[in-house]
Amino acid sequence: MTRAWKFPMVLALCGALVATGLLVRGSPGTAAALLLGFVLLAAGHSPLAFPRSITAAEAQRRSAVDGRPIVYWRAGCPYCLRLRFRLGRRARRAHWVDIWHDPDGAAAVRAANDGNETVPTVLVAGRAHVNPDPAWVREQFPPAT
């Protein structure tokens, strides 16, 4: 199991344990609601909430061709999750690099952030922007063809 899935799995497991305890005490409605909440929280912090990641090298190659932003992210980051959901459908047009799965992506983020792995870091036209406003990121997409 990779590092990106550990936190979501812990959330789901904790939800199951809490729900089981509530179910044993005779509160099936509360147990179901709590379990659903934990599962949704786990899904939001999992790699499933994000478009498929590619390597940093591939993202740089594609961005040079199409001019789309590169978003460096990691699972479990609330700021990355905020950016992902605020971008809406446009999120799929960006090139997403999971720094926990790509050492070159992590190195690119450290180079842009004085040695820190601060995400989301968005690379637009070769310039890094740390935790930018999602509205600004939406404006950076080239017009759809």
Image: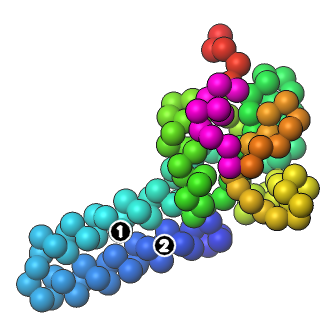
Helix, strand or loop under label 1 = helix
Q: Quadrant of residue 125?
A: top right
Residue 62: percent from the left, percent from the top? 81, 31
Pick whichever, 96 or 130, lies toward us. Answer: 130
**Type of residue at label 2?**
Met
Question: In this image, 85 relative to 1: left or right?
Answer: left
Pick whichever, 117 or 133, lies toward us. Answer: 133
User: Which residue is rendered at x = 86% and y = 38% of the image?
Assistant: 127
Residue 142: percent from the left, percent from the top? 70, 19
User: Which residue is rendered at x = 40% and y = 78% of the image?
Assistant: 13
Residue at which label 1 appears: 38
Question: In this image, 36 relative to 120: left or right?
Answer: left
Query: How many C-alpha atoms fall within 10 Å of the one at disc 2: few (<14), some, or many (≥20)?
Result: some
| The N terminus lies in quadrant | bottom right
Query: How many C-alpha atoms fall within 10 Å of the one at disc 1: few (<14), some, or many (≥20)?
Result: many
Question: In this image, 66 relative to 137: left or right?
Answer: right
Residue at which label 2 appears: 9
Q: Is residue 35 above or below residue 136?
A: below
Q: Is residue 54 above or below residue 10?
A: above
Residue 104 can be seen, yes or no: no
Instruction: Please tell me whether residue 46 belongs to the stretch shown in magenta.
Output: no
Residue 129: percent from the left, percent from the top? 77, 43
Instruction: Please tell me whether residue 139 belongs to the stretch shown in magenta.
Output: yes
Helix, strand or loop under label 2 = helix
Q: Which residues are magenta?
A: 131-140
**Type of residue at label 1?**
Phe
Q: Earlier in the sequence, mark 2 or mark 1?
A: 2
Of the two numbered discs 2 and 1 in the rendering, the one whose residue sits closer to the viewer: 1
Question: In this image, 75 relative to 55: left or right?
Answer: left
